[in-house]
Image (tube, rainbow, N blue to C red):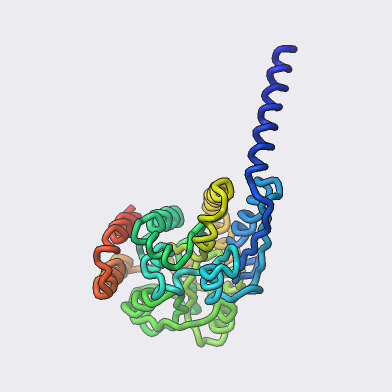
Amino acid sequence: MLTTFIRAAAGAAVALAAHQAAAQDYPDVTLRMAHPLPESWPAAQWDKWWAEEVERRSDGAVKIELFWSGQLGGLLEVKDLVASGAVDLGVFAQAVHASEMPLTSVAAGLLNRVSADAETAQALAGQVYAAEPTRAELDALNLHPIKWTVTSPYRLLCNTPIEETADLEGLRVRAVGGAYVPIWMESYGMVPTRVQAPEIREGLQRGTLDCNFGPIEWVPFFSLQSVAPYLSDINTGTFTTFQLYAPADRWNAWPESVRDLMTEVAEDAMARDLDWLDGAEAEAIQTFRDAGGEIVELADMADFVAQSPDMIAVWQDDMDEAGMAEAVAPIVEMQREAAKSFEE
C-alpha cells in the first residue's frame, strides 16, 4: 500500500512539473477576436468555447477577448480586419468573399448538393484548406484558418408546401453566399432574393419572401415556425457557415506551443459542434412540429435530383475561364468524392 502511495505521489509530482513546464511555454498575451454575430446565434457557442478553452488550457496565459455583434467590424469587414492585422482573430463567412478567395470559398460548401451531411462538410473543408493551391491563396491574403462551424443540411422553409419540383417555380427564396447558390436556385425557376438574416421573419410574414434557405436549427432562433409552417425534405447540401481566422504572419510568429494549443482546441471544438448538432437539429424539428409545422415530402425527388445542375462543373468552368484549371484540379477531385455522400 505504501509503495502504491509513493508511486502515485511521484506520478502526481511528475505530472505537476510537466504541467508547470508546459504552462511556462505560453507567453502572457491578450488577443482580440472580432465576431460579427450575437453570442446567442446557433453554434456560436463553439467559438466562445474555443476562446475560453484556450485560456483555460494555457492557465490564463493566452487570453482571448471576444467582441460580439460586429463591435469591431460587420460581416463584410472582419476579413479585412484580420488580413491587415487590425485584430488578432476574426470570424467571418468566407462564402461572401468568393470573388476574392475562389479556392478557399468552396471549402464553405459554396456549391449545392456536394456535402449531404455535416460530417462530410466539415471534413471537406479541412481537405480544401490543406490543398497546396488553397494554402497559396490564403498566404497571399495573409489568412490562416483555425476552425469552422457546420450546420444541418440547408432546406427550404416556406409559407407554401413544396410537393413537387414544379412548385419551386417563381418562389422568392432567400439566397446566401456568393453567385453559385443563386445559379442553383434559378435552375428550378426560383427567384433568389437577398435578405439580411434579421429580416427573414418579416419577409416571410409580409410575403416579400416565400422561403428561407437555411438549416432547421435557425428556425427557432428567428421564430420562423409561425410564419413559414412548411419544411421541405429536399436536402440542398450542408454548408460550413462561419470560419475563424488569424492573420497568417501573426500566426507564424506565435510560439509553436500557442499554435499547437489553438489547433488542438479547434479540433475539440469542431468535434463538439458535430455532437451538439444532432441534438440541436432534433430539438428544432420538434419545436417546429409542436408549433404546427409540417414536413413536406417531395413526390418527385428523382426528377428534382435529375434536374439539379452539376455545380462542381459550373464552378470548375468558371475557374478554367479565369486561368485556374491546374489550381482547382485537386479541389474538384475532393468535391467529387464528397458528393458521393448523396449516393449513400
- How far across and down, in percent of the image, does residue 260 sit? 54, 47
Q: Please give left or right for residue 23 compared with residue 252 in the image.
A: right
Q: Please give left or right for residue 308 compared with residue 215 in the image.
A: left
Q: Quadrant of residue 237?
A: bottom left
Q: Please give left or right for residue 264 compared with residue 314 in the image.
A: right
Q: Pick the residue in front: 272 or 130.
A: 130
Quadrant where the N terminus lies? top right
The residue located at (55%, 57%) in the rendering is 282
- How far across and down, in percent of the image, does residue 52 sit? 67, 54
The residue located at (63%, 43%) in the rendering is 25
Q: Quadrant of residue 324?
A: bottom left
- How far across and down, in percent of the image, does residue 142 sit? 47, 65
7 over 73 or under it: above or below = above
Q: Pick the residue in front: 299 or 95.
A: 95
99 over 289 or under it: above or below = below
Q: Pick the residue in front: 163 or 152.
A: 152
- How far across and down, in percent of the image, does residue 75 sit? 55, 74
The residue located at (53%, 52%) in the rendering is 270
Q: How many marks?
A: 0
Can the viewer see residue 303 in this picture? no
